Amino acid sequence: MNQSIEFHYTTTQRGSPAIQIGTDLYRVQKKNINGSIRYTCTNERCNASLTIFENKIQIMRGTHKHGQRLLPFHIGEIVNEFRQAIVSDIRTPLPQIYDKFAKKFLREYGSAAEMLMFRQVRATGYRVRTKALPPCPKKQDIATFHIPDVFRLNLSHEPFLIHDSANPYRIIVFASKSSLNHLASCSAIHSDRTFFMAPRYFKQAYIIHGWRANTDLASEVREKNVEKMIADLIALPMVPKHVVRQRFDLISQQLRSINPLFNSFLMYFRRTHFTTKPNIWLWIMLIKDFDETTTIAIEQEEHQQRQTRLRHRKNIQRDQDLFELKQKLEKQHIDIEGYCILLRHFSYTYMKQLDA
């Protein structure tokens, strides 16, 4: 008789009653006349079994001669909750949902070291989410597939699908009434097409947008001299702290001299990145949240001996280049102007990503 072994009631993959002890799963074999229940290991080649009576283990027989079959119960439980949330909260990105449950695990068990990393559950998570959506149309069904009513409305439950035809090709147009009204008030209407964003089996996706009259900033930012200044703004977080405001004032002066209408953008930039004074209590809550996320990542990497997020070679090289550039400035091999000019190379990389 062994009553000290902890076990948990659960189910098999097919939903049948089962119990879990450690990383082993037992299914019901038979129910005895005296009310006890005999369980056997779900591994067909394993002879391990046990008998439970009144929620206590009475007898255990055999040994498990196979490797780990399941996650420990407390880890499997949180992973199952994560998968359920993926379906019930379908608009929230998976990394945010994972972060929420990783922090819950940390608070309940004092450490998140054993918690599966996001990259270990990412693929399964996206498959689960895909199954929660209607089946994707096949190539031969593109011209005839039906769009469910829930996808014909926007988040305000207003009509969103304004055109759907298949003669000779399937063309679907989405827009809300308010968006169309704003578009109609614009002096110029543009259309950006992309192959990358188009759903499978559709050749292209177009984003239609308009520009307000008398701004003319869209053409300005494509000019080489303006592009350099925008790159300098993006690079401000990488310049020494004592020259950030000086650099911003200089860039602002140059942009305003080209077009005074840049003033609204510059005021927004200053208000957002320079003069914002957040509520002290919200700020403390934010940094506590960051600290918890960092703690989870460190514990997982140290315990599981793997990285929480794999880094691309180009990002590693970019970090190394930035480090070397900073060393040149600190050793006075280049001055601040030369440093800022070289920083533009990194800013252009991000600008190209935004344009893509």
Image (cartoon, grey):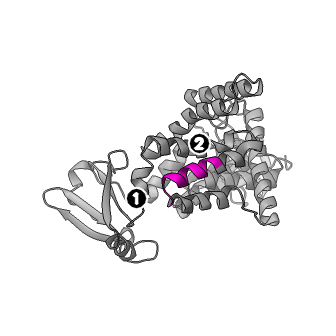
Whichever of callouts 2 and 1 sits on the residue coming sooner in the sequence is 1
Structural crowding at the residue carrying mark 2, measured as other residues with C-alpha within 10 Å and reported as few (<14), some (14–19) or many (≥20):
many
Q: Are marks 2 and 1 in contact (CB under 8 Å)?
A: no
Residue at label 1?
A: 216
Is residue 151 positioned above or below 132 on the image? below
- Magenta run includes residue 255: yes
- Disc assigned to residue 232: 2
Q: Secondary structure at mark 1?
A: loop
219 horizontally vs 50: left or right: left
x then y, percent, for residue 354:
47, 46
Instruction: Report the quarter where the C terminus lies.
Output: top left
For the point 67% across and 27% down, the residue is 325
Magenta-drawn segment: 250-260
Q: Amino acid at mark 1?
A: Asp
Is 65 in front, or is 207? 207
Q: Secondary structure at mark 2?
A: helix
For the point 59% across and 60% down, the residue is 85
Query: Taking the image as drawn, is residue 163 in sight?
Result: yes
Q: Residue furthest front?
A: 257
Q: Amino acid at mark 2?
A: Asp
Q: Residue furthest left?
A: 168
Is 157 in front, or is 271? 271
x then y, percent, for residue 259:
48, 56
x then y, percent, for residue 114:
74, 41
